[in-house]
Image (spheres, helix red, strand yellow):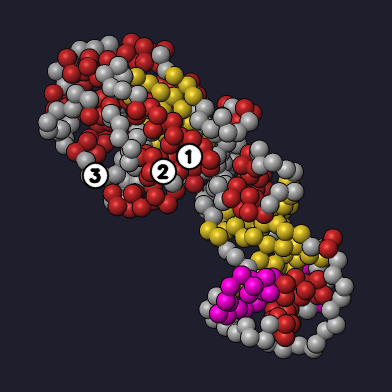
Amino acid sequence: MSGQPMVPAPRSQASYGPCVLLKHGEIFLKGRNRHRFTERLHDNLRVALRGIGGSTWIKTAQNVTVLGGQVPRDALVERARRVVGFNSVEPAVRVPSTLDDVTRAGVEALRDLAALGPVRSFAVRARRRDKQFPLKSSEVAAYVGARVKEALPHLPVELKRPEVLLSIEIDRKETYLSWTRLPGLTGLPVGSSGRALVLLSGGYDSPVAGLRAMRRGLACDFVHFSGAPYTNPSSVYKAYALARELNRHQPPGRLHVIALGKAQKQLAVAGAGRLQVVAQRRLMIRTASALAARTGAEALVTGDSLGQVASQTLANMAAVDEAATLPVLRPLLGWDKQEIIDEARAIGTADISVLPDEDCCQLLAPPRVTTRAGLPQLRAVEKRIDLDEVVEVLLDHVQVMLPGADEEPAAHAAGACRPAEVSS
């Protein structure tokens, strides 16, 4: 890297400020509707910033959101990484778009990093969004790199695979410099695809499926079926904790808890036998469909993985779906168990899912579950009980919670998460 030596200008403290660069995900493909997705993304970001303890601001550049405020940058980074729709989250500094300010900020950033520990190599990349800037992108990178090398002569340059990549993005009035790239959750902004109801158990699968649904733009409420009054409330505690964790990534959705134990016993008395598990899954789907009609959800989401257990064979899934009145989405259909567990660990739900509980699915389950439930046999069992009345009783006694309400303002309630009508 080369360039003529420069005389450092006096540093102006007011010219510098920490910020966070948030690189947009696939919404940049949305063409004429992109602004609607961006608005939804920013609405979700504002929700994530509530209660952070200071004022914040949000600016929009080309396929980039800039976040700052009177709070520590690390706190902004932590909140921004919760928001679905950003490809990366980059701690940064913003300076006026002059060569002197950009160069000085670049040198100081590398000096500060070198002071924290050995830096094996560095490189500079520049992107000139403002084409009126007097130097080309490559010239800015070379110039700033040369100044860094003059200030830190023992710092090696490595253009292909540097340990530290100093990124410079030049806009018309402000330039942003970043040196750390943290992965975001990617996907579409929560709420841009509609609203769904997630059947949330206490295991690994359903919370992973819930977050996957959110990453496809679905705002999610949750329903948990417990085995009460024949099981203890441990599964409800787990469902609440899981919903609270998932609500960190969206304007919080409600958790509906339904005691299924008596209805499960009715199915058993009606002679379900080896059909018991599939029959109660059909009852869950039927009840969830009725609940979705009340809450405005347009789809159900389950954690089913094809063939993972006997009740999740293709034939049994088809039998369960027949009881639904709206689409049943299965984001994990092709995942194996280890992939699901690894994802649960990555998103922070695994430590909750592994806690012991009394799962309603095991209540009254037969020693062997049929892998190919027939609809005529299932309907014959269901005719022996009044399903419509059973569903009404279940919904009349539903318990509604708002996980995370103890941590976030009450304004997160129902209306705060209504999905926008957005098409791609």
User: Quick one: quadrant of the N terminus?
Assistant: bottom right
Rendered image quadrant of residue 154: bottom right
Q: Nearer the viewer, mark 3 or mark 2?
A: 2
Q: Nearer the viewer, mark 1 or mark 2?
A: 2
Badge number at residue 349: 2
Q: Residue at x 38, y 40 (%)?
A: 352
Badge number at residue 226: none
Q: Give the secondary structure at mark 1.
A: helix
Of label 3 and label 2, which has the lower sequence position? Answer: 3
Label 2 Cα neighbours within 10 Å, binned few <14 / some 14-19 / many ≥20: many
Residue 247: x %, y % from top left: 51, 37
Residue 414 horizontal side relative to residue 213, left or right: right
Q: Which residues are magenta?
A: 109-134
Q: Amino acid at mark 2?
A: Thr
Q: Are marks 1 and 2 in contact (CB under 8 Å)?
A: yes
Question: Spatial distance from mark 3 to mark 2, Cα to Cα?
Answer: 20 Å
Q: Are marks 3 and 1 in contact (CB under 8 Å)?
A: no
Q: Are marks 3 and 2 in contact (CB under 8 Å)?
A: no
Residue 29: x %, y % from top left: 58, 56
Question: Spatial distance from mark 3 to mark 1, Cα to Cα?
Answer: 24 Å
Residue 293 horizontal side relative to residue 104, left or right: left
Which residue in the structure is indicated by mark 1?
A: 246
Badge number at residue 308: 3
Residue 166: x %, y % from top left: 64, 72
Q: Amino acid at mark 1?
A: Leu
